[in-house]
Image (cartoon, helix red, strand yellow):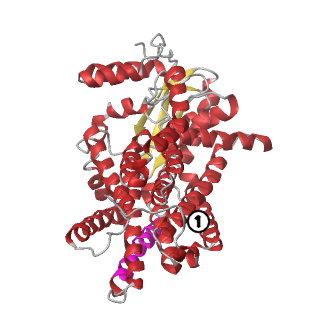
């Protein structure tokens, strides 16, 4: 992956046409409007895990408290930066009335998408994709993200932050800017620690960054280290408890694993899932084709500077491999990083091919033009599938919760009034209930006392190296914390239900079911 060196100076071709400030501003503005429309499409159908993040943001905005419920400190938010940004925006909403993390989510959706569009503008400029080719490439790249149902079905989680930082990192590597790359890399580590896979590959793929790797690394550390030190000492672990919790849920999906999860989703919704994964599959094929050309052709001059794009795609493959080895379940948002990485690489390679064909008379533009058009059709196909499910969505396209967001909100509000300060055990899905209940609802995600048992089990099951790593991560964990005493249990059962302390719900995944509040059983 040794690309031709680039400089931070824009080439002459890039200073005209596409790279004009008006074109960049236009792309950013259109992306912002499109993101706002996307949010209006999905805002009433947020998944339960999205509400875990929103509950954290709500407590942070109102009380400066890091926890899923107001009564307990916890460390189950996978993306610290997502919570911090949502918490800050939710706090701003308190200036005008009641706190509204959902409104803050809408604002963040727009801002992050605009940042991604700005990154695309820089990326295509660095690759000399001028004129309409650059605009089309950036637009297709954005469309592949914003129309992907796996992304839209997880809005509220960090799924839009991920493509933004990936595109920006690629752009800054192409521009040979180690400080800017390091800053964005630090933000990436705050979004999801596992994005270190992309950070490492992108940092090593070009000589310009490798030569100043210490500067890039220092920038990343200065951005990310303060949070992780705070989390390590104050919250008791640098890495969120979610990793331990998710790894302990191996049997939750039956025979399905992260490796085979796409098949599971495809069986349920062939059209939606097939279109969603096609850009990723074609991205793999495009990478293989480029590698064959790169090493199978005798270049009279230096080969093109596509190392960072190759690193982005390889990062998607490596991410998929790492998650397969980790043995986590096939949660649909876990597929977003490899999806957006490989689909973005696909868009760039198609656009680059077309741009070079237009520059060289010996190359015909029909094939690359058709390739970019096909990639655009994949994005439009996903968009058509999204709209087919109604406007706005009543439930996400990719969905596995026991109740719709609207039903969960109703149950949560009524449950909070019913409990009157008592503590209830979660039925297994806690996010939306905790957000609307604002009560003491507990499980391993909200009650650190319960999470400690999972942590100890994980340490005991690990090999010698794993034990050392986990013990270091939980070095400052307060193990004296006990599980919160429970007064009630909220139980979910399939089928209709009626009577006192019973709430009937509906789900596009499970159909009709009901929750029933029962006195806690002695333990």
Let me know if residue 326 appears in the view: yes
Residue 179 at x, y percent in the picture: 53, 47
Looking at the image, which is closer to me, 310 or 337? 310
Residue 434 position within the rendered picture, expressed as x and y whole percent measured from the top left: 56, 33
Considering only vertical position in the picture, is 28 above or below 415?
below
Q: Position of residue 278 (x, y in %)?
A: 33, 65
414 or 333: which is nearer to us?
333
Q: Is residue 387 visible?
A: no
In terms of depth relative to the viewer, which is nearer, 314 or 157? 314
Q: Position of residue 279 (x, y in %)?
A: 36, 65
User: In which image quadrant can residue 439 be found?
Assistant: top right
Pointer 1 residue = 31
Is 484 located above or below residue 293 in the figure?
above
Look at the image and tell me in which quarter the N terminus lies. Answer: bottom left
Residue density around tag 1, few if under 14, some if 14–19, many if 20 or more, within 10 Å: many
Q: Quadrant of the C terminus?
A: top left
Q: Residue at x 46, y 27 (%)?
A: 238
Q: Is residue 377 magenta?
A: yes
The reply, left or right, for residue 517 in relation to residue 282 is right
Chief secondary structure of the magenta portion: helix
Q: Nearer the viewer, residue 455 or 272?
A: 455
Q: Residue at the location (52% across, 80% down)? A: 132
Magenta stretch: give its range. 368-387
Q: Residue at x 28, y 38 (%)?
A: 326
Name the element at disc 1.
helix
> Is 273 within the magenta?
no
- Check the image and report above or below for 16 versus 475: below
Q: Is residue 326 left or right of residue 243?
A: left
Q: Residue at x 47, y 74 (%)?
A: 129
In the orientation shown, which residue stands out farthest toward the right? Answer: 96
Q: Splitting the image into 4 quarters, where does residue 271 fall?
A: bottom left
Give the farthest residue toward the left: 296
């Amino acid at each position: 992956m040794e690309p031709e060196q680039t400089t931070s100076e824009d080439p002459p071709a890039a200073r005209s046409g596409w790279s004009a400030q008006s074109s960049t501003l236009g792309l950013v503005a259109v992306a912002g409007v499109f993101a706002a429309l996307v949010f209006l499409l999905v805002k009433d159908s947020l998944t339960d895990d999205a509400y875990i993040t929103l509950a954290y943001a709500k407590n942070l905005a109102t009380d400066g408290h890091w926890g899923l419920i107001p009564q307990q400190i916890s460390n189950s938010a996978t993306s610290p930066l997502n919570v911090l940004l949502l918490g800050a925006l939710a706090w701003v909403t308190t200036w005008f009335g009641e706190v509204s993390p959902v409104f803050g989510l809408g604002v963040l959706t727009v801002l992050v998408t605009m940042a991604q569009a700005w990154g695309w503008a820089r990326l295509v400029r660095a690759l000399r994709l001028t004129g309409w080719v650059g605009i089309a490439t950036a637009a297709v790249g954005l469309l592949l993200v914003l129309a992907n149902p796996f992304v839209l079905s997880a809005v509220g989680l960090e799924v839009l932050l991920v493509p933004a930082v990936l595109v920006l990192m690629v752009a800054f590597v192409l521009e040979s800017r180690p400080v800017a790359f390091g800053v964005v890399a630090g933000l990436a580590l705050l979004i999801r620690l596992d994005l270190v896979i992309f950070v490492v590959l992108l940092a090593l793929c070009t000589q310009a960054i490798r030569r100043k790797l210490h500067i890039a690394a220092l920038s990343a550390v200065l951005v990310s280290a303060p949070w992780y030190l705070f989390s390590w000492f104050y919250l008791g672990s640098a890495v969120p408890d979610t990793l331990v919790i998710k790894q302990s849920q191996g049997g939750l999906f039956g025979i399905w694993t992260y490796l085979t999860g796409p098949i599971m989703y495809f069986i349920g919704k062939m059209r939606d899932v097939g279109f969603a994964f096609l850009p990723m599959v074609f991205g793999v094929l495009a990478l293989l084709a480029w590698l064959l050309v790169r090493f199978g052709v005798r270049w009279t001059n230096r080969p093109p500077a596509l190392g960072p794009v190759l690193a982005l795609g390889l990062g998607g493959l490596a991410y998929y491999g790492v998650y397969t080895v980790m043995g986590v379940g096939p949660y649909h948002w876990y597929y977003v990083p490899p999806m957006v990485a490989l689909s973005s690489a696909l868009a760039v390679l198609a656009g680059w091919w077309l741009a070079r064909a237009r520059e060289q008379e010996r190359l015909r533009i029909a094939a690359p033009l058709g390739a970019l058009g096909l990639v655009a059709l994949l994005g439009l196909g996903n968009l058509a599938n999204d709209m087919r499910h109604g406007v706005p969505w009543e439930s996400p396209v990719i969905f596995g919760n026991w109740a719709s967001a609207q039903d969960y909100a109703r149950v949560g509000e009524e449950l909070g009034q019913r409990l009157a300060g008592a503590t209830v055990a979660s039925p297994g899905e806690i996010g939306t209930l905790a957000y609307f209940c604002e009560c003491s609802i507990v499980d391993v995600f909200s009650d650190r006392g319960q999470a400690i048992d999972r942590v100890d089990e994980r340490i005991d099951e690990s090999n010698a190296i794993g034990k050392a790593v986990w013990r270091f991560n939980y070095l400052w964990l307060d193990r004296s914390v006990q599980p919160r005493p429970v007064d009630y249990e909220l139980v979910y059962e399939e089928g209709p239900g009626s009577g006192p302390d019973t709430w009937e719900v509906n789900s596009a995944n499970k159909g009709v079911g009901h929750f029933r509040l029962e006195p806690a059983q002695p333990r």
